Image (cartoon, coloured by chain):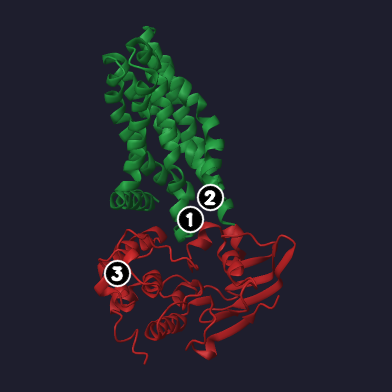
Chain colours: A green, B red
Amino acid sequence: MWDAFVAVFSRDLLQAWRRRADWLTTFFFFIIVVSLFPLGVGPEPALLRTMAPGIVWVAALLAAMLSLPRVFGTDHADGTLEQLILTPQPLVVLVVAKVGAHWLLTGVPLALMAPVLGLQFGLDGAPVGVLFFALLLGTPCLSLIGAVGAALTLGVRGGGVLIALLVLPLYVPVLIFGAGAVEATVAGTGASGHLSLLAAGLLAALVLAPWATAAALRVALE
Amino acid sequence: MISWPAARFPETVRYNPTPSEEMNSIDLHPMLEVRKLACRRGERVLFEDVSFQVEPGELLWIEGRNGCGKTSLMRILCGLSPADAGEIRWRGETARALGEDFVREIVYLGHANALKEDLTVEENLRFGARLAGLEMAPILIESALDASGLAERRDLAVRHLSQGQRRRAALARLWLARSRPLWILDEPFAALDAESVQRLAALVSSYLEDGGLAVLTTHQEVPLPAGRMRRLRLSH
């Protein structure tokens, strides 16, 4: 079982390395979207500081969503998904491997980049740190929940738009608590409550989402 | 000319238990039994009342025109799609009840090659084998690549291969899967050149001699052993 997990995880990373453009697109999309806001709303430092957490989180949501069709899309198109389902290992383990690789390729770079973008918005030490940790906890949720949407829309015409409609409402709690954590730090009330809720959300998603994804994948292939 | 596999396949392959050795305990039930299988697509009946049995060493060749449900039947057999009626029994138990134990005993090759364009031929073979839990000693990988005529292209990304070469790269997995008792092959000969057809036919023949079961579809006449072969025609 562990061997199959490692096989899927390392294959996805290797493939992503060979097709770096795919994942760098998502990363630069995130940077550009965040950078557009100061240009649009003007250079008022207090306004930017207030808006920063929301902007970074909304951009992270959109960037994560942009990459979702690729999670299972290519495997579905080239027949690999059939072979994944026909392995003696539980499909849910392989789903976790794929989602893990997706998070490492999209979520982690966003979390690492966010502090730099936070500084651009005038956030200082503590809020920037909280932004980083909140994204580190929140982005795996985005990958896990997003995988359910990606599996449900597999092979559906116009699946990209449908994923957005399915997944964005489910991202709302992550957005609220993620952005809320940074805002609370700026306001001086402490972010531990928000971060705890994010962590609880992550655990719940980790337990539930892979099963839902595996079930959706089986349905998609019938 | 069928010199393969005796001349080129290494003896180490015999470390694997042959399917017949694994199946010695089966005597009461047919190894693979399909009863009154039916498949519908919306209102349209693709096939119904399809029943057959396959015993060790036998090949079932499923024939029929395009769209008659051959691929659907293959997908139902390996458990990818549910049947609308009927049941599949493996060693006397329903495939549904066996679940992963049934999956562990089959190899399925579908229309799609299940190859990653950006990975090399060897990487694809290793990944496929690892995922399926097949034995992948270096010498076996070596001989599978050699047997499928891709040894020289092993380090080439699959996107640089022709359709026929891609098919061969997908089929290379079969050389590692001789210990699996049931092969379900959907159009395995499609896009292959004459030499590759011969090699694959020889592999299937030797697999049947070892006591394996194979179910396959193909539109072309291929040199498979007539004595071990049964034909099933889907006529809807």
Q: CA distance from mark 3 to mark 2?
A: 33 Å
Mark 2 to mark 1: distance in Å? 8 Å
Q: On the rendered image, what quadrant is the C terminus of chain B found in?
A: bottom right
Extreme residue in the top direction: A188
Residue A118, percent from left and from top: 31, 21
- Residue B206 rendering spot, x and y as whole percentages: 42, 83
Q: Label 1, label 3: how many angstroms apart (C-alpha)?
A: 26 Å
Q: Residues within 10 Å of mark 3 (few under 14, many from 20)?
A: many
Q: Are marks 2 and 1 in contact (CB under 8 Å)?
A: yes
Q: Say whether residue A73 is visible.
A: yes
Residue A124: where, in percent of width, then height?
27, 14
The answer for which chain carries disc 3 is: B
Task: Specify the label residue A76 is tagged with.
Answer: 1
Judged by depth in the image, the label closer to the viewer, 3 or 2, is 2
User: Mark 3 = which residue?
Assistant: B141
Can you tell which mark lies on residue A154? 2
Picture quarter with the N terminus of chain B: bottom left
